[in-house]
Image (cartoon, rainbow, N blue to C red):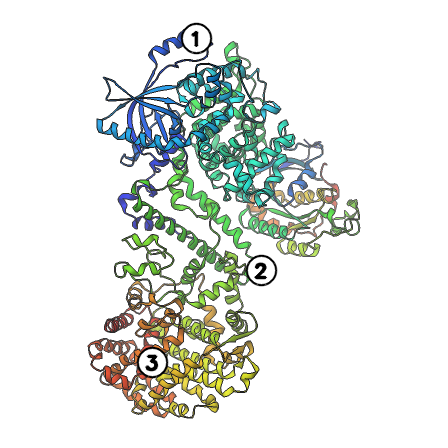
Amino acid sequence: MADSTAPKPSSSVKLVLLGEAASSLVLRFVNNDFQENKEPTIGAAFLTQKCNLPTRTIKFEIWDTAGQERFASLAPMYYRNAQSALVVYDLTKPTSLIKAKHWVAELQRQASPGIVIALVGNKLDLTNETSSSNPLGEDGDGEAAEGEDADGDARKISTAEAKSYAEEEGLLFFETSAKLGTNVTEVFTAIANAIPETSLKGARGPGASQAAARTEDQSRVNLTGPRDAASKEGCAC
Amino acid sequence: MFNLSSLVQKAQSLIDPTQALNISASDRNPAKSTLFRHQFRLPDSQTPLQEITAELTISPPIAYSPNATQGEKDRDRDRGYHYAGKLHLSESYLCFSTQPTSFLQTASTSTSSGFTGQTHGAGPGGNGFTLPLCAIRRVERLHSQSYQFALAITTWNGISNTSTNETSKTPAYQQKITIQLAGSRQACERFCDGLKKGLKSGVGEVGKLKRVVAECYSEYLLQGDGKKTGEPPDAGLGMLFRYPGDARKLRDRSKMRLWGEYLRENGRNVTLIRQPTFHKLIRVGLPNRLRGEIWEQTSGSLFLRLEHPTLFAETLAKYEGRDSLAIDEIEKDLNRSLPEYPGFQSEEGIGRLRRVLTAYSWTNEEVGYCQAMNIVVAALLIYMSESQAFFLLSTLCDRLLPGYYSTTMYGTLLDQRVFESLVEKTMPILWDHLVKSDVQLSVVSLPWFLSLYINSMPLVFAFRVLDVFFLEGPKVLFQVGLAILRINGEELLDAADDGAFISVLKGYFSKLDESAHPTSTNQKLRAVTRFQELMVVAFKEFSGITQSSISEQRMKHKDAVLNSIESFAKRTSIRNLGPDSKRLSTDDLGALYDRFYGILYERQMRSQMIQEETDRRLKASKARAAEVVNGLAETQSVEKGRVGLGPSPTLMDYDGFREFLAGIARWAITDSPSPPEKDYPSERDKHSYFGNSVRRREVSMSPWGAGNPEPADHEFMQRLFRRWDVDMQNALTLQNVVTGIAHIKGKGDIMGSITYFFELYDDDGDGKVDREGILRISEALLFLSRRGLEGSLTPSSSMTGLSEFEAGNGAQIDGPQGTTNERFLSSVSAFIRRCFEYADPDHPQNQETPGESTTNGTADNNAFGIGEDSDEEEDLLDLGPDATPKRGKKLTGLSSNPPASGKPDNDNQRSVSKAQAEAANAALDPSKPLHITLPTFRMVVLADELLEQFFESSFPASFRISDKLTPPGPASSSSSLTTFSNIGFNRASNAASQTAAIVGSSAAGVVPPGKGLRGVLDNIVTDGMRVAAEVRRRMDEAQKELEKNAVHRPEDDEDEEEGYDGPRTSGTYGGDAERRSVRSEDRDLLEGVDAEAMSIRGQEGVTEVKQNALSPTSPADPGRARSISTATQKVVEFEQ
């Protein structure tokens, strides 16, 4: 497991991955020397990764759901009781954002009330703006992309479009490149930060703690919060 | 949501209760033929034909290879094996099992499912055989003292070797079994006759048999030792890439020897006889090279292959080069299927996997491809050929793992639920712990079931599970799963989250080959591996888990699982409806979704029921039933098409669309439902929906379902259907329907509504609607309004005719007039007039004769205006190019009321209008085309307040989505609607009949098909009027008040209407009904006054007709409707 450090309080967070091209993102996050489920995904793959925050350690228990359409009806099994969700779309495929929106709506309606949802546009490496402009300057990580100047811009979904949707729905929003590693860690760090502490008491518990989380969540889940410092800290990878 | 149980009840009530056994959901036992097929693993084509108690004697081999000459076998030769059991005969199989059970139709269901053998009905349990009749070489009748009948059966065992053996002078092994039949002489003879018949038809299959058998490894194995010739048959990738596991450790060689011996004595592949050793040999694990063949044999996929030996190759050839979504998905997974096995790192293995998955996706497009199938097939391919794996996959999907890989994966979810409930029952402490620590068991166990443990356990052990699974059926998966949890119970109680839970089990699986009792001092105990322990726990401790207990659990949880899938599907689907759906509320969308799929589902069920009913009547003994293991069997047959069950219909055809509209719009309910079968047996075939199949039945089964209103079939609905069918596939998706409704309902602006309507009739999209189109629009307006208008016109929008009627009156803004409906009728006629007035001629040369073209229009309009009163006479007289402006008044007269007809000077006019009507028909000549454009149409509509309101509110409001639409009360619908049908509308074409329904029922009986509104009007002129003449006379007496009003009429149209309106509003429907009932008394008088009617024909005809047309607008008013119906009925009698 991760290089566990100081005796910071540690808690585990269940995270469910939904949408297209999600697996590569989580593999990037988990990959290095952390355990990875090599088996082909049946239903969902289970992975874990630790994320060190200044004040605590978050252990992500990640359910990476199978990509095939028909497995969607199994999804409720996995997002049940999840405290966080990563809804990924492929920013070169317009349909994938539509699907992502459905997942968001599904989660908001069916998952536990306080769930922290991050909307992530993946495959930033296929656009020609990786080096020039980081749309997420506010996260202070514009230099992360080792830009290769691809000639064609395969981007089909503009940052503004997805971002405004995310703001409307109160989602965390990132554009990433799993291939290059752009913004990947930031996504998870931001999620870790957004999880209300009330829902972190020891092992995940249903009921009271989550109900409390719900109210607190409103203020926490927004992009412009003072999270820059925390995101610099980064995960333990 | 569709109410399932009531549907099922409805279904059952329509089916002869004594015969409904096979598809009844209340009877928890599946069809006997299904049980029979499962018991002997037979293809779907087989049904139990004969059965008889018998004793099987397996005579020892006559000759076999020299190495098997132990003393024990010599003894066997002397005495043979004897088994008592039951012998079954199907179309092409002879089956024997020691487990006494009956599958015949006459047997009670409990005897067919009551056995408790090793496999509990899920597989070829017990001792016996499943012998294709084509594998029987000869049957001799033996003379026997103790039994009446004894048959000696010689099989084609080893058929593929006979020729070579003969040349090499090795005595061919002959398998011979003896069966003594125990039964009455008659029963025995009947059985033998059946057998004889079957054998005869089986002779032709021997070639197939030879071919199929040649692919079995046993044939090669049993060739004379040391003299094996030719290449061994394909026994999977293992032959090229080695089989998984250490062959020595697996003791593969000794297993092979044991099997060799067994097969030599008991027959191989198709002629194999199951004896106790067989089950034992399977439990210890199959030898590599025979594994595929035994899987094929025990699962029954061998018999599928025997049915279509070339299906695999043919399928591949047939679809070569074709592309599909499934193929794309398969391609993505090929490299992720058992990648650790060397065979799947090679093109050879990948290629085989691709071909099997692809071929299957074509043969079962409903399932197509589901992730996890790649893993299962990859595993199969290690031990069997592509063709064998193809058929085994098919058996898996259809029978062993029902619904697992379907598009909703309901089978998977259902079995997870079942598994959870079994855990709760058998390991309550562990279950409590899981609940407390919030671990969902199925996230762990789902892959076990979905990939048959192949992905969870090391391969060698997963294959051992499969060995038993194919023989004993799906319960094995549950037993093994429970055993895993039981063995790891202690550690699992310490695990507090998903991660810990998973890692405990992962650790366990990785140590399956280690000793279960490593510290034991007992040598023997120490040698027991964890896997062996697992098998013992699974099959001993959980021996209570049987096929029937699983079926029971499946039944119990099925509805909850399907409901949750369906509500998930619904949420997803509604979100996917695209931007247009945003115009409708979520409630509306939900209601549309329910209605859409409810109708598709109901229709499918209904047609299936009708189909089954027909089948049943055709051959009562061969009722069809679905092919799923117990619990799902009968439910599937009834519930096919339910969303949760997987690929359900998503397209709505035109008939479904009609039904859909009838549910949300009152105008879409027909006025002329098909007559009851008893009354008009010969009319049945006129109903195209049924085709021929239904004519045979005596019981009338409405294609619309009992109690549902029968939808109308108007041209407007066809146009709407075509308009909504944007994909031109002659069917609508939910998306189409939602978009279609959103365009009508969601816009809320009148211009959009008008444009929409115009475009509906602008067939070629050139912005013009021709004469035909104008008339059709007016027909549609009448059609849509015939049950009253909704929205702002009738704000209370009450369903009772009375209050609606009053509301219509109360809502009048511009002074007293007739009812809303009557006013609307006049608006429509004004509409037609104005349309023709402002229409543009199509061709420049026509512009030179505008007078003529308008005359055409005028003449045509006169067909409407036949009931006009005196002030129109002037117009008619100076009819000509400049008559156009006055036509408006004339047509308004169309709405004039009965009293108006009592004019002395009408005779004069009548002859004129008659002439005009004739001219009209001539003038409709298409050589004088004209058209209106959208701006014209818009102007014409806006020129009339009522039409404006119609487009602004009533038309959109006539689609009622989430607020429940009350269908016309049963009383009124059965009376008034049946009345219409009695008139014989069915003979008229659809459009014509609907129009006729609007314009006039009494005249409709003689409407010639295809003439539409004009035809109807012509008929009104020629026929309906003589009826009306007498009506007028009676009216004079019975309706004095009205008569008085009529006297005022010459002065002014408006006055007349006002006058008429008085009694209407004050007397309300009482007077109305009275007036109508008067007409009912007319019938006996009509004939006498026929001549008189001739002279004044036409006038009252229209009014009479109009009354009838309008009456259905208050269908919920029983008193009124009934009186109408009696009136009309009698009129009809008269006319006939």
Nearer the observer, disc 3 or disc 2?
Answer: 3
Numbered-mark total = 3
Three-letter amino acid code of the residue under disc 2: Pro
Badge 2 element: helix
The Cα–Cα distance between marks 3 and 2, rounded to whole angstroms, is 51 Å
Three-letter amino acid code of the residue under disc 3: Val
Residue B473 seen in the current view: no
The chain holding disc 2 is B
Instruction: Tell me if residue B647 comes above or below residue B689 in the rendering.
Output: above
Q: Earlier in the sequence, mark 3 or mark 1?
A: 1
**Residue B285, percent across and down?**
50, 20
Three-letter amino acid code of the residue under disc 1: Thr
**Residue B129, percent across and down?**
38, 24
Instruction: Tell me if residue B510 comes above or below residue B813 in the rendering.
Output: above
Q: Which residue is mark 1?
A: B69
Q: Nearer the viewer, residue B192 or A217?
A: B192
Q: Earlier in the sequence, mark 1 or mark 2?
A: 1
Badge 3 element: helix
Instruction: Tell me if residue B574 comes above or below residue B57 in the rendering.
Output: below
Residue A165 seen in the current view: yes
Q: Residues within 10 Å of mark 1 (few under 14, many from 20)?
A: few
The image's mark for residue B1021 is 3
Mark 3 and mark 1 in contact? Answer it, CB < 8 Å.
Answer: no
In the rendered structure, the answer to whether residue B406 lies left or right of residue A160 reads left
- Residues at discs 3 and 1 both on one chain: yes
**Residue B1072, percent across and down?**
28, 77
Mark 1 and mark 2 in contact? Answer it, CB < 8 Å.
Answer: no
Q: Which residue is mark 2?
A: B579
Q: Nearer the viewer, residue B701 or B687?
A: B687
Point 32% across, 26% down: residue:
B87
Mark 3 and mark 2 in contact? Answer it, CB < 8 Å.
Answer: no
The chain holding disc 3 is B
